[in-house]
Image (spheres, grey):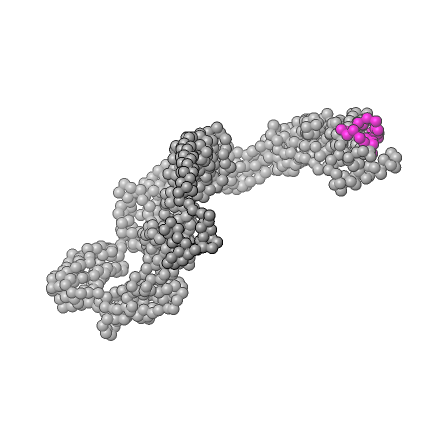
Amino acid sequence: MSKKTFVGLFLGFILSATGVHTSCPIELNPPSVVVRYGDSVSVNCSTSESSFSKIGWEAPKGGTSTESTKGTHSIWTVESLRDSTAPQCFISPSNQSHFEQCLKNLNIVVYMFPENISIISSGRSDGVMIENENYNFTCNIHQIAPVRNLTVRWYKGDTIIRTDSFDNEHKEPVNQSSVYSLKPTRQDNGVTYRCEAYMDLGPEGPQLNVPSQEYKITVYYGPDLPCSVIELLEGVALNTSECQVEGNPTPVIKWHKDNKLIDTGAPMTREDTGVYTVEAQGNSHFRKTLQVHMLYGPELNCPSNYTALEHAPHNFTCTAQGYPKPVTTWYKDGEEVELPGKLKRRDAGQYLIIASNKISTVNFTVDIIVKYPPSEIVELEHSVVEVGSTVWLKCSSMGNPRPNYLWTYYRMANVIEETEDGVSRLLIQNATAYNMGSYTCNAFNDIRHVFKTVTVNVTGVKAECPITITPERMVVQYNKETRTAKCKPMFSTNNAKVSWGNETSSDSWNVNTTEDWNASPVCIATFDGLGTCTKSLNFTLYKIPDRIFIHQHNLSSMVVGRVLQLQCDIINVAPARNLTVRWYQGNDTKRSIDSGSLRVTGCRPENSSNCDIGAVRYPVNVSSTISVLLDRRHNGTQFRCEALLDLGPEGPQPPSNPMTSTVDITVIYKPIINTTKLPRIIPVFRGYPEELVCEADGHPPPKIQWFHSSGKVLQRPSVAPSANTLSVSEAGMYNCSATNEVGSIYHVVEVILKEDYLPLIAGFVAVTVVAISVIFLFIYSIYYKNTRMRRYSLKNPKPSTPNGNVAHNGWDQQLAMTRLS
């Protein structure tokens, strides 16, 4: 290649790399080539340009360089291609060319694929492998290219178990292998393996594959014994067990017990139960120790009666022998029961014990006696009696032994006790206010005692817990100054104890205004003889909302006829039950929603399953939703919601200013044409154009356009907020169309042309008036000249008497005149 050609190619490469031009007028046919190793190849390089200096090939490997200065193409040919060379076709411009020096590369793939492949194993030549040992299969592929297009598939039987691909970028034929590792098990005995070479050369080339021969393996395993325990019925031989030694090749087996060889074909008894050793010689030497059990029916050993203490651990034993271990079932009164570890009074009685296994069944009867403490007291109930009347209190309990009774109450002389036949009674005669309170009955035996407390209420006298709380109701704002509630006895009592709940012995309770949302303060008082009573503080911790806002719930396009849902969210308010939400449309109240129809949306996770708006007291988010059926009157309307927290007379007075949020609604609706200003028929006098006014209301504002009945557009469409006017002077049908994105409407006007005779009549009248006027003036001028007119001169006037003015037809003139001759 000449130095000039090399420089041209180099410059073309530089220009192409730097992006001076983006296209090269070269076409390769075929654009890419897939060819078997050693075969011939031919590629044509052509151009559609008519003006160029030179076209040719630069082939650094294999083939020859060709150049053409006369034709529009150049052919690159190789008789036997043995490497993946990279030929380039170039074109050099002439002085008249409109392109730069450029070149194109030819994509070539040279491949070689073997007719046969082989598979070899790292194991024995006869295919024998030992279970759970590692082996390798190697698949050998000789003289193959290109390796990156090669895929090796491994088969176990007819199932693909592995696929290998390669990153080797060598394009020359090489030897390639694939290795598959396995650890055979006894289930693989007799299985065949093979490999398959597959090459995919894309749409331009063939798809090639060749399999190896099949390799069958034999797996040696064992000997081993799959079980560690053998169970046999008495009288059955050991060699009939389902658990036998396994192995390949078949092993030689011996059984031993206590180092003595035994006959596995002899019948066995329960005394033969024990530890055995088995030895086997096969693929390897095997030795294993296992347990042999003899199966026999159950035998029961139980006492005929037993006495136990209720709820105390008992030592009742009833053993059942047998193998397998018998299943013992207890029955009482015909029903299956389970004897608990600690007996109860209801567990006393006669039991039937049945022991069974898969061999046989036996039964036994036992009587169980349970000593128990007094039962819960019954028949003692709360009582209400009128002042001065009599009431009985009855106390009874069941126990073994029978219980004794003791009453505890505020003792008075009018109260009498008596006990008879396991029941104790207390008689209150002529009840007074001092008999009100709690009465406790204690029942006991040598095991323990129980008690029950009831109250007696005497009507006709006022009774309440004799304590006072100041204030009676406390309403406190969140995160504000703390307040204190006081609790004290109503009357001075030496032995009275007053406290707030169980947490403090103080008579004062201080609210935590940041945490006590669910606080229910209770004052507890204890009086000798009257017992303990309580009184609760009516307490509310409130928080005004952080903010309130409205958002649109369901519509992305607000069109007339659709339902719009608006949601008012009140954020972080407490307590929600005191919240009222009012909706307004403009300045009118749309709806007032109290807490009963509100929805809580901000419950704490631990209370989300039971978040009742009437019960939750900590700050939550509350929402209110209304539905509005949209019509065109809603366009531009403002909706707002108002949240008011009213806490009653103990709360802030007046209640805190309501918080509001507003939203403006824009409604889209179809146009409507105002037909009151545009009648169906309009007469027009010839020569006097008439204006047609088309007004349309719609949102978005409609486009108004006039059409003639001939289909001619009379006006360009325009958005007219009020009207669109058309001047007409010809008869015909005129169509006014109003259109927006929601829809369109039209109105047709018929224009009737009429003749106007009024100008002709007016002209004729005018001509007649002019003619009459001319005639009248002519006659009047003759008359005036002959009879009425005189000739005068202003020179040398002669004044008349008495004022010196010139007399004229008896009229006095203001100027002195001289009559002319």
What range is drawn magenta here?
47-74
Magenta stretch: includes residue 64: yes
The chief SS type of the magenta part is: loop
Q: Position of residue 576 (x, y in %)?
A: 35, 56
Q: Report the front residue among 499 and 348.
A: 499
Residue lying furthest front in this view?
Answer: 821
Residue 607 in view: no
Q: Report the front residue among 220 and 684.
A: 684
Q: Report the front residue among 385 and 231.
A: 385
Residue drawn at x 40%, y 36% as measured from the top left: 772
Q: Horizontal placement of 65 versus 729: left or right?
A: right
Residue 513 in view: yes
In the figure, 411 relative to 162: above or below? below
In the figure, 312 relative to 90: above or below? below
Labels in figure, total? 0
Residue drawn at x 38%, y 42% as measured from the top left: 631
Magenta stretch: includes residue 617: no
Q: Position of residue 302 (x, y in %)?
A: 33, 46
Say which quarter of the image contains residue 469: bottom left
Q: Position of residue 562 (x, y in %)?
A: 39, 41
Q: Report the front residue among 235 and 527.
A: 527
Say which quarter of the image contains residue 280: top right
Q: Horizontal placement of 478 versus 164: left or right?
A: left
Residue drawn at x 42%, y 51% as measured from the top left: 663
Residue drawn at x 29%, y 55% as measured from the top left: 309
Say which quarter of the image contains residue 245: top right
The quadrant in which the N terminus is found is: top right
